[in-house]
Amino acid sequence: MRFTFRLARNEQLLLLGVLLAIVAFWGGLSELVGRWYKQEEYSHGFFLPLISLFLLWYRRDVLKKSRGAPSAWGLVLLLVAALLLVLGEVTALFLAVQFGFLLALVGLVLCYGGVSLLRVSWLPIAFLLFAIPLPYFIDSQISWRLQLLSSSMGVGLLRALGYAVYLEGNVIDLGNYKLQVVEACSGLRYLYPLLSLSFLMAYIYPAKMVWRVLVFLSAIPITVLTNSARIAMVGVLVARWGNGMADGFLHYFEGWVIFLVCQLVLMAEIWVIERFTLKRSFMEVQQQIPLPPVATPSGVFSARWSRPLVAALVLLVAGWAAALAVGGREEVRPLRANLATFPLELGNWRATESSLSIEVEQALGFSDYVLADYRDEAGDVVNFYTAYYASQRKGVSPHSPQVCIPGGGWVISGISDHKVGLNDGTPLEVVRVVISKDNMHQLVYYWFEQRGRRISNEYLMKWYLLEDAILRNRTDGALVRMVTPMRPGEPAGAADARLTAFARLAVPLLGPYVPK
């Protein structure tokens, strides 16, 4: 007995379109998989495409009955997807490529079966949004804010239980034990997978839309509260059984256990909603995954309608070719001096050069850099770091200090925009960051030198990167960072004055090293 499986012409074209989209958008998709592998908060991403495929397979009969005439809007979306692909190629903004891939899938659905088919297939495609990681600098901003929030709420719970604790930034002083709420304690490794799960639960939950939206959005406060309770529990353990209990508890309860607790709280929330609204039993709520109703086909589907899909393939090939052309175009490389020759004497500051390990240099991907500790006659120190990138294509771009700082064990306890007045009267806008580690505090200034612009806003930096890549065929630029330790009891204003004085000496000298 032989089993044969044949696809109709349009189905073959649709499958070819999906494969072509994967190949064309592969740069962004491979970076996405790399983030799943490297970052624990996104490791659940490996399962999300499988869930999406299962949802499509589960509703296969509804999809077949909902197939209608192709829609021209599919070609419009594919054109937008191709533009996003090119945009991501010239700016190293993988988020644009990843969103473009999902738009391409939607466009292919419209070219194959029209709006009626999209009505019953949008959810499995939209679910893939949870598989797309946020840009690093957005991730880091969310992380340190959640650290501060979890720290303050954890301390509030401890005080409510009658324990005397002191909070300084992200360090909780328990008397005989100091707990530092680091990046791993922000709760992101529970929040992102829980949002995916709460979305599915809200979809399956047979209730009014307002309750389903509530179930989905409640994943955020549930994560924050549960994480704060975990931090508070450490204080209770330390007070009752000593310091040794803390590390074990933190290690054991920082992963899947807390995630399961959050899931149980979500289920309890549904029980409460049912108990006081529809008054159904919990067993009545548990049912199989609902199927969407068959959508009225938009016109009569014909297997002979292959022109929209052929046009879709042409658009995908054109977008892919344009991205390859942009990525392979030789950029303008302005003449510049090597940062190794940056002066080691600035006024009364004398420098001792340092270097990064080969592994770190390869990870950061810069073309040139200088790293030096400048010390003045009073013994004050400013660490000066400038990393120059000859090209910011192919995913190589300055790493935001907000990403690197937590990686070194430091905790961001304050961040703001700040202006420094240079000697020529021009203002220098910087990002001002206060970081803490154990009992140490440091003040950080950083900004981006980008083809004649000094930019502190990372979103604006990406915009100018796109503009200059198209109009000037240049994507070079640099990150400049200055760090000074704060002495015990030293007011922040003294550290600000120190970095301001150093910036007035160093910034005017950057011109030959970071061309306009």
Image: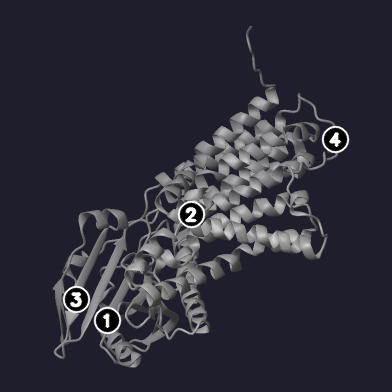
Residue mark closest to the camera, 2 vs 4: 2
Other residues around mark 2 within 10 Å, as few (<14) / some (14–19) / many (≥20): few
Dot placed on the residue nearer the N-terminal end, 1 or 4: 4
Residue mark closest to the camera, 3 vs 2: 2
Q: Residue at x 45, y 81 (%)?
A: 417
Label 3 secondary element:
strand
Other residues around mark 3 within 10 Å, as few (<14) / some (14–19) / many (≥20): some
- Name the residue carrying label 4: 299
Given contact means CB atoms under 8 Å apart, are the residues at marks 1 and 3 in contact? no
Q: Residue at x 53, y 83 (%)?
A: 160
- Name the residue carrying label 3: 373
Q: Is residue 483 left or right of residue 180?
A: left
Q: 317 and 232: which one is in front?
A: 232
- Name the residue carrying label 1: 484
Dot placed on the residue nearer the N-terminal end, 3 or 4: 4
Residue mark closest to the camera, 1 vs 2: 2
Residue mark closest to the camera, 1 vs 4: 1
Given contact means CB atoms under 8 Å apart, are the residues at marks 2 and 4 in contact? no
Dot placed on the residue nearer the N-terminal end, 1 or 2: 2
- Whole-Å distance between the Cαs marked 1 and 4? 68 Å
Label 2 secondary element:
helix
- Residue 338 image position (x, y, % from top left): 21, 64
Q: Is residue 171 left or right of residue 351?
A: right
Can residue 422 be seen here? The reply is yes
**Residue at far front of view:** 240
Which amino acid lies under the numbered mark 1 shown in the image of this protein?
Thr
- Residue 416 image position (x, y, % from top left): 45, 81
Which amino acid lies under the numbered mark 4 shown in the image of this protein?
Gly
- Name the residue carrying label 2: 256
Can residue 213 be seen here? The reply is no
